[in-house]
Image (tube, coloured by chain):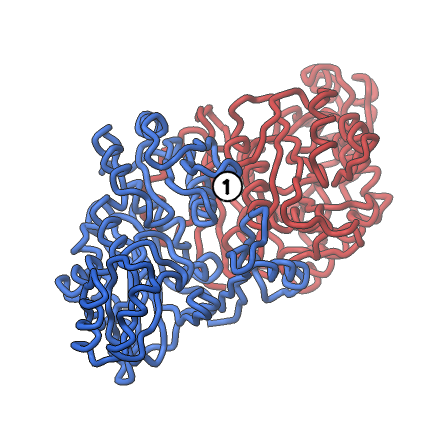
Chain colours: A red, B blue
Amino acid sequence: MKPLSPGSTIGILGGGQLGRMLATAAARLGFDVIILDPEPDCPASRVSARHLAAPYDDAEALKVLAGSCGVVTVEFENVPAAALETLIALGVPVAPGPRALAIAQDRVDEKTFLNGAGAPTVAFAAASTAGEAAGAAEALGGRVLIKTRREGYDGKGQAWAASAGEAGAVFRALGERPVIVEAPADFRRELSIIAARGWDGAVAAFPLAENTHVQGILRRSVAPAAVSPDQVLEAGEIARRILDGLDYVGVIGIELFELGDGRLLVNEIAPRVHNSGHWTQDGAAIDQFEQHVRAVTGWPLGPAHATARVEMTNLLGDEVTQWAALAADPTCRLHLYGKREARPGRKMAHVNRMSDL
Amino acid sequence: MKPLSPGSTIGILGGGQLGRMLATAAARLGFDVIILDPEPDCPASRVSARHLAAPYDDAEALKVLAGSCGVVTVEFENVPAAALETLIALGVPVAPGPRALAIAQDRVDEKTFLNGAGAPTVAFAAASTAGEAAGAAEALGGRVLIKTRREGYDGKGQAWAASAGEAGAVFRALGERPVIVEAPADFRRELSIIAARGWDGAVAAFPLAENTHVQGILRRSVAPAAVSPDQVLEAGEIARRILDGLDYVGVIGIELFELGDGRLLVNEIAPRVHNSGHWTQDGAAIDQFEQHVRAVTGWPLGPAHATARVEMTNLLGDEVTQWAALAADPTCRLHLYGKREARPGRKMAHVNRMSDL
């Protein structure tokens, strides 16, 4: 794609905090932003030139986007792939493309793709009945993690079965929906790599982050993670295989398990900017949001090296009331999302705690 | 002032690039922004929750601001002081206050204030007639710089008189308006210090920048400037005297002359974020825009130390077409303003060139 000139408009499907931070990064590069999000007062709407408050598959809204935008992107992976197909049919470039989203929306398709691309994962099997789930658990050694194939996030839609005998009950508890049955990953740490790929196939990756999840929600990322040079190479190679395999354009978040022997498995991919990359806002040469804007607009990718050591912590629910104390701490950089309601567990803000590399 | 909670709204008078960068800094801290600027499609309007396209003294618009905002600030000094008085009368805090703006709007009042506050300047005199201008030039040694008292910026509204005999002609060429007649400053370098003061009187200053002007317009700032420890102390003391003397709240830009013997004179003050502080976006712990937002909202001031060495260059007029080459340079951080027309000399963007401290 010919690079979009400053003054062009970028469409973003989704107007949460990721859309908000993408919008301000786009503004820094001279772009205007139109947000499509059904929520009338969504966080990104207040930092964008225009907000279309309509469903993601609204024909009229998609027509407006296609008519106004030089490119359309997404802030979350559960946008209906059909909406992206409609936009492409209307003649506007979309990045990442519908195939990447479709693959990331289905955990079986995702892991099948990953293994095919040469990115290792835990062993897994698909199941559509309680019997299939039990059979899969048996084949995978008994104790398994069962997840709905679609629409789980932040630890929702998944549960452990301690044995093949329990797998049927877990399947029913998850709503008797198609599931993926996964062998346990005997991991030492959770890591992630945030990488980007341009329309021209160029790839750039940020240093790895080490992540801590609590109840399925990311609590903390530390970057650059203490990893071996081999692991840096391995993670970079995994990222390149995934990006090339998806013919991907934009920033992707790749969650990794570090096994006891140091090898890396891919846990899941998020075809968008990623919570574990928020450290880049204060600790990298450019941040993941600008990198994504550069990638999707056909600009050259920017430098992704670390400039500081960062510990990023999410502020969930009413933890956001800590803002005054955090604002007074000179080691902290605060990022608040402008959400009106601090519901329990809701991501309201994050803080980057700075130290020297 | 009690710190404004995230979710509150900040009003900004002026919607150019400074308002735009203030608005995105405010968004980062969870604030909403309303812009008042008569220009329908001004740069800040596209990154703000709301834009009132009305004159700065529009009674209805000021009422909306007062009714919606927790504080109102300005992006440029030539806002009518009466508009700020109206806002205060309507019960909304305004920072910086009308007195600081009124003083900065009149070069004679400004230098009179500065000397009274213990901040040294060149010798000067006021003149309202050609005869007074000639007399002032005579008293100041012949060769003088004559400036209109009000409304000059970026080198406009000023001219040199080589002798007292020329002063009358220069006075007439400037439109026979009240002027300030200034002795030449025999300076070695132009420096500036960007400082902030909170409602509680706390003061913080960024490291000094060394500035190069061409035809009265800032071309380049290098920061931190190579200055002596004594000069750092002296500049900090000057900043504190000015801020305390104005009972100032917010970020201020103070332009300095460095004389041959190293002493500092104040050239002028800008009661707002300042072009020579744009380096802080990529080279300081927090940037001048967040610092201003913190100051005016009653938040604690943030850390202002340098984290990198930066050479900031303005892109004027069609120099903005260099964006593609600059985007490909990994040492460059680009900031584009979203202006529709690249008129000659217009500030369209700036680039921060990074190197290690």
Q: Residue at x 60, y 62 (%)?
A: B319
Which quadrant of the structure image shows residue A49?
A: top right
Q: Residue at x 31, y 75 (%)?
A: B161
Which secondary structure lies at badge 1? loop
Q: Is residue B311 left or right of residue B304?
A: right
The location of residue B34, given as percent across then percent down, is 42, 34
Q: Residue at x 29, y 49 (%)?
A: B250
The location of residue A81, given as percent across then percent down, is 77, 28
From this view, report whether residue B238 is shown above or below residue A193. Answer: below
Residue for badge 1 = B42
Q: Is residue B255 left or right of residue A271?
A: left
Which quadrant of the structure image shows residue B182?
A: bottom left
> The residue marked by circle 1 belongs to what chain?
B
Q: Residue at x 73, y 45 (%)?
A: A266
Which one is nearer the viewer's eye here, A67 or A324? A67
- Residue A139 visible at all: no
What amino acid is found at the position of numbered circle 1 in the picture?
Cys
